[in-house]
Structures are given as C-alpha cells and as structure tokens.
Image (cartoon, rainbow, N blue to C red):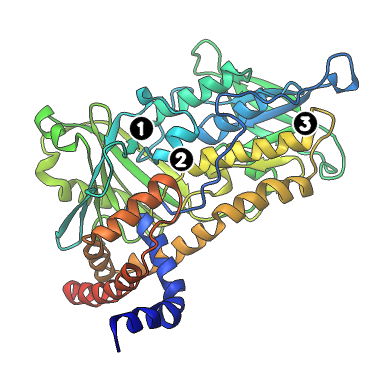
Amino acid sequence: LTKTDLVHSFHHHIYPKTQPYISIMKLFLSFLALSGASAFAPSSSFNGQTLSNGATSGSALDMKYKVAVVGGGPAGACAAEIFAQEKGIETLLFERKMDNAKPCGGAIPLCMVGEFDIPETVVDRKVRRMNLISPSGVEVDIGETLKPDEYIGMTRREILDKFLRDRAIEYGASPINGLVTSIDVPADHKTSEAQYTLHYQEYEGGSSVGTPKTMNVDYIVGADGANSRVAKAMDAGVYNFAIAFQERIKIPDEKMAFYEEMAEMYVGDDVSPDFYGWVFPKYDHVGVGTGTVVNRPAIKQYQKAIRDRAGDKIAGGKIIKVEAHPIPEHYRPRRVQGRIALVGDAAGYVTKCSGEGIYFAAKSGRMAAEEIVKCMKGGSHLPTQAEVEQTYLKKYDSAYGPTYAVLDILQKVFYSNNGAREAFVELCNSKYVQQVTFDSYLYKTVQGNNPLDDLKLLGETVGSLIKGYSIAQ
C-alpha cells in the first residue's frame, strides 16, 4: 500500500468509527481549562443597544407588568438588564448582600469578556498559564498555545457581580436590598394571570435588621442560588449539591509574583475524591480552595490537604477570608412553573468536572429574559409556562445540554481514582491537547479538526489510562 492508499483508508473507514470517542475526548479537554465545552450562540440583544419594542404611549399597551428578579449575581443581573430595557416591564432586582463575596474560583472565559462587555477593570488577573499537578506530584505546565491577546480572566465575585448589577440598575432596574423569605403562589397560577405575593425583609441604611414587606408581581425569575427560595416556592424539586470551600490568602509579594499569570489545579484523593483543588490569583491575594459532593463533612480535611500540597508557594500567607457555598450538581427537575422561571445556580447550571457556573449563569439569565420579553409582546401578554419552556428551556438545553451530560460521564471516568487522574495529567503534556483545551474554553466551542491528530489523541488517552493506573498502584 502507498501512503496515499493509507490516508484514503483512514479517512473513509477508520476515522468515522472513532468520531464519537474523539468528540467525547474533545469535550473532556475543555474541563482542563475550568469549563465544559459548549455551543456559543452570540446574543444580539445587548451589545450596546437597547430593546425597542416597548409599549406605545396612550394605548392599551401602556400597562406595565411587574417582574421580580430574585438574586443579584451574574444570572439575576443579566436577566434584569434585559427586562429593564423593555418599556412594558417594571423590573425589581432583589439582592440581600450588595457586597456579597461568593466563594468561587472566579474564572471567566475570554468570550464572556466580549459578549457581556466586561471591562478590564473587573478582571484582576489574566491567566495565560496553568500548572496541573497529579496525585504523585507530576507537574504539567500548559498555556504555550495561547496567543498574546488570549487569557482566562480571574475575577472577584464582589467586583464582577456589582458591575453587572450596577449596569442593570443604570438601564432602569429598581434595586431592593432585601431577602425574599417566602412567596404566595396562587393555586391557579398556571392558567390565570393572578399575581404572586413576595414576602421579604428589606434592609435600609445599612441596618442588619430587616423590615417585613410584601409586593405583588406578575412574573418571577429565580436567580437566588443553590439554596433558592424561589425554587422551593414553585416546587422545583430537590437536587444534589457539592460544597465549595475557599480561603483567600495574602502571600508575600515575591511569592505573589509566581501567580502573576499562573493558576494551579491539584488533583488527587487527598484534595478531593470527586473534584480538584485550586490556587487562583486575585487582585492582591490568592484563592485556595476545593470542593466535593460525595464527602461533604470532610471538606476542611480536603482544604488542609490543598494548602499542604501548595506548600512553600503559599507559606507565610495570612488567611484574610474564609468562604463556603453549595454548588448544584445537576438541573432542577422543574425549571419553569407557571410564571416562575429559574436561571443560574438556582436552575442547576453548573458543569461537572470543572464546576464552572459564571458564564452559564450570565448566559441563562440573559437568554431567559430575552425569551420572556419576546413572549410579552411589548407588555400586552403574560407568557405561559408552555411558551417559556418552548423558547428559553428548549434553546438553552439545545445549546448546552449535551455538554452537561458528557462532562457528567467524564467526571465518573477521570475522577474515579488516582490512576485516572494520573492519566489525565499526562494527557495534558500534548500541545494538541492544550490547543483544543484552551480554544474550547475561551470560545465555548469544541475545537480541533485534524483527523490524524484526533486518532493519535484517542490512542494516547488509552495509553495514559493504562500507565496512570500502574503509577497509582
């Protein structure tokens, strides 16, 4: 056989049969860069332009529907921003802690910076290198394939959330510093336009004691996190969750210089039985943390292990803040009920393996609001449950559903034991792996179109798994 014959045979007989496995591997690779790969559908609703289908003055369309967005993180803020631009809607944005510092790695992909017009002042650090450390201590430094203008943005949630929330307020959303405690849901809310009654505590003038208040609204968007009270009120169903634990540690300047453009990920049973430990650079400190779903009571033990693994690199540091927060493990059984819709963590939009949720929170909030606004027809119609399910949920699931499903499988494969983790780290030595990984994360689309390299990657995966198991024994 000639070389031409071999290439022809590979393209027409071998490569098509390996495509399903190669596609799964590409999705796995994006986990490395702190995210699941997913379809990226650019939004045209914002990009500096306001919506223009508001009610016409002097007509029956002058009526305003009241929309309550409960939760002022990326999901709620991005939803409120869209509603606030619509003349036929009065937008109320509820947030209990306006300076909330959620325990979170804080990584955002480059596409989010552009798509959501995030200014550089919100990005603390531009990570261009990732140090990945295996259970046995093998280190792989990745990032050589990045272009000069490419990076992973590292943010502090109190800064990012405030920026997004302030922008929604500038567009006309009314902020309420309050905690929604319960919601009266009319028995016929799925078939009528009866209003919902929100019971909440409003905190004014910096007071730590809230004033009980109520408010009637026509539509509710629940963006109030994993412990969502909106989800409870609408009977969204239970779901499993992980615990994320993070310490913000101030380290000496000479040690902080190491993390100037560097983030670290540690894998191993010692730091987490089903997740990873991290050291992520912030403005003037590092975030050191871990997470788990299968052994939540041992979270502090895992946290000590990640500090020990980081060792001298953070030695002498001072813990300036300790944070813990639940992270959803899968979709809520019901994300839309009547005229109540869930977005972000409240809906369960956090990827397995990586635990990424910021981009998906912002995207789901914007997407849900856009579809609800369209269904409202300028303030003349309240969307039904079926309409929102057929628009918002259908579009979101079509774009991102496969990502969640595949990453769930991959977490079971590569986080099952230390042998699989060793294999994962070894795979990341490949420049092709690194290219596919970062492109997939930064732009939310699966990259890599070289059939020969794809087949080689499949072989390397099998070989690395075999070698990894032998190292772990």
Which residue position is annotated with label 2?
358
Which residue position is annotated with label 3?
218
Left-right relation of 279 to 451: left
Tag 2's secondary structure? helix
Quadrant of the frame with the C terminus: bottom left
Label 2 neighbour load within 10 Å: few <14, some 14-19, many 20+: many
- What amino acid is found at the position of numbered circle 2 in the picture? Ile
Query: Between residues 355 and 212, which one lies in front from this camera angle?
Result: 355
User: Is residue 340 depicted above or below 378 in this figure?
Assistant: below
Which residue position is annotated with label 1?
155
Query: Of the residues tagged 3 and 2, which is closer to the observer?
Result: 2
Asked whether the residues under the numbered discs 1 and 2 touch, taking CB atoms below 8 Å apart as contact, a structural biologist would say yes
Tag 1's secondary structure? loop
Q: Residue at x 87, y 40 (%)?
A: 192
Residue 247: give x, y in percent of width and height.
Answer: 28, 37
Tag 3's secondary structure? loop
Cα gap from disc 3 to disc 1, whole angstroms: 34 Å
Q: Residue at x 23, y 26 (%)?
A: 284
